[in-house]
Amino acid sequence: MRQLIARRLLQVIPMLFFISIICFGLIKLAPGDPVLSFVTPNMHLEDIERMRHSLGLDQPAYVQYVLWLKKSLTGDLGYSLINHQPVLDQILDRLPATAGLMGASIILAVLIAIPLGLLAAANRNRWIDKLINLMSYIGISVPLFWLGILLIYLFAIYLHWLPSTGMRTIGTDSVLDVLKHGILPCFVLAFSFLSVYVRYIRSSTITQLKEEYVQIQYAFGSGKRLVLFRHVLKHVLLPIITLLGMSAADLVAGAIVTETVFSWPGIGSLGMTAVKGMDYPVIMGITLFSALFLILGNLLADILYSIADPRIKSTR
């Protein structure tokens, strides 16, 4: 286990280096000039060039990347071109909001997907199985932003049950208020994974129900519910762990869309603002944090997988 963790952590540095080069290259190839967003009608061409020089944007791209990399190695991700605040401070300020949204969404998706997947598999080809399958296909097909807008209209505008945007009401600092603001974005982000999880759990459970150990339990008089939750569920947990690791990339992408729709003050909405303003120091910082999250998420999945099935330790 220690060797696995050490080996994977050593892979983080070259992967982050490679990702930073790709991201920086794509930013430079993208159309647009970040300086133009600061230009006013009264500014002269000399003022614009002076601003470009002060930001280091008049230097070749490879020089800009080397300067950025040197600062990054010391923990300095630079300053935002839009609000001139340190990039690292902005990311750390918004990280708890994004982490809370992601964590709550994954937990909600798993807690709902396990009973639905088991229920569908136990009632294979019956009406309840077909209903769950239909809901799964709808969930996979529905775009996140469309679902978010639909729920905002229904629960915030029409019924007035829940707030539509933000993380808290201005002037209020209660936990209940934060929970009310988080219900809709949490459900929307969880819904995109819930449908996929249900399909995998159903398929895995059907496979396990054909195994010999299940037939033996039925022969000894064990009920269907007992067999499902005591004997089958522990074998179904393995693909769930794999899914959690594979969902890391989709989780980041889904969080960006969800935070934008609900104006959730997390890293995703910060990234969208940075992309619109060509704020490349913030884009680079968020890219590095997202890549680090993906790598650590997959490492955590591998560790959990090894704990759930000790036979895997010897093969890695």
Image (cartoon, rainbow, N blue to C red):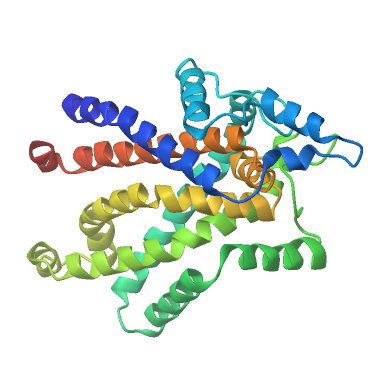
Left or right: 80 with respect to 6? right
Q: Is residue 168 visible?
A: no
Closer to us: 46 or 248? 46
Look at 75% across and 34% down and name the residue there.
174
Q: Is residue 104 above or below residue 313?
A: below
Q: Is residue 157 above or below residue 178?
A: below
Closer to us: 161 or 16? 16
Look at 73% across and 31% down and name the residue there.
49
Q: Is residue 134 visible?
A: yes
* Rendered image quadrant of residue 100: top right
Left or right: 280 with respect to 26? right
Q: Is residue 154 above or below residue 73?
A: below
The image quadrant where one finds the C terminus is top left
* Rendered image quadrant of residue 171: top right
Task: Residue 55: give x, y in percent of width and height.
Answer: 66, 26
Left or right: 116 with respect to 35? left
Closer to us: 193 or 122? 193
* Rendered image quadrant of residue 112: bottom left
Task: Residue 134: give x, y in percent of width and height.
Answer: 45, 79
Look at 69% across and 23% down and name the residue there.
54
Task: Residue 194: give x, y in percent of width and height.
Answer: 45, 61
The image quadrant where one finds the N terminus is top left
Residue located farthest toward the top when viewing the structure as drawn: 74
